[in-house]
Amino acid sequence: VGVSRVVFTSSKAAVGTLQHPYIHPDYEPVSESVQTNPYDVYGSAKLAAEVLGKQLAEKFGIDLIVLRLASTYGPGKTVRHGKVGILSAIIEGAHRGEPVKISSGADQKNDFLYCKDIAQAVAKAGNANLGGYHMFHIGSGKLSSLRDFVAVLQNQLPDSDIAIGDGLDYAGGGSGHYFLMDIQAARTMLDYQPLYDVERGVADYVSSLRLHAKG
């Protein structure tokens, strides 16, 4: 088929809804071997693509690396992508000077993955000479609450009007799909090293929006 290697970006949605000890309050890191339980059509489609991709890769002798991404945010990712765009909606709304109101979820912790770390992971996967099929969880390596995320944003945009209610579910669907990706395999085999914690990611995002606004 003229292709020797494919990198497929999957999603934590393929993992789906988890139980203790992976969710609040324990947040044990979730490895690639965890039992999957997608909670929506998007997650089911991603999981199906993983399975089909593996079968096709084996049939045609193609190297396939699947990257399951944590909760992503960054310039260009907006609410048109669905619920997972809530982080970008908060940042871009605040940047435009709009009041941002989220009814609940400030206490929930999650693995927030910035777009530039995704780019790093994809580049390293594309250059990896591993052979065959491999799957890696890609995340930031740490948890942050939505409250902390918003606090960082308000440091960047002091005049912003953001109100987040207490609770553990800001995106809807229950608290079982907020968790920390175990990225040890990606660190070891891809030399993936996340560079953007929430502070750096939000600062870079806001800087990008300001630059774009200037034309």
Image (spheres, rainbow, N blue to C red):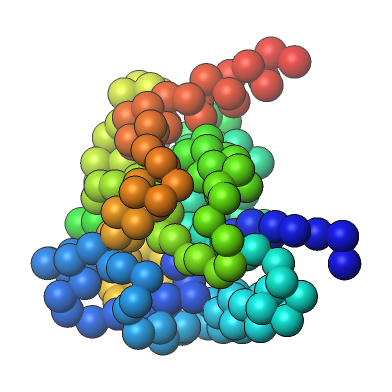
- Seen as rendered, the residue at the extreme top is 214
Q: Residue at x 57, y 31 (%)?
A: 96
Going by the image, does 32 lie left or right of 48?
left
Q: Quadrant of the C terminus?
A: top right
Q: Residue at x 25, y 47 (%)?
A: 142
Q: Quadrant of residue 12?
A: bottom left
- Seen as rendered, the residue at the extreme left is 26
Q: Quadrant of residue 176?
A: bottom left
Where is residue 125? Give x, y as percent: 56, 49
Q: Residue at x 67, y 20 (%)?
A: 213
Along the line of sight, which residue is nearer the eye, 137 or 210?
A: 137
Q: Quadrant of the N terminus?
A: bottom right
Where is residue 94? Give x, y as percent: 48, 34
Q: Residue at x 27, y 35 (%)?
A: 151
Going by the image, does 173 lie left or right of 14?
left
Going by the image, does 89 lie left or right of 34?
right
Where is residue 119? Give x, y as percent: 57, 40
Where is residue 72? Give x, y as percent: 49, 51
Q: Is residue 88 visible?
A: no
Along the line of sight, which residue is nearer the eye, 136 or 3?
A: 3
Depicted 55 relative to depicted 208: above or below: below
Going by the image, does 66 lie left or right of 107?
right
Q: Quadrant of residue 42?
A: bottom right
- Seen as rendered, the residue at the extreme right is 1
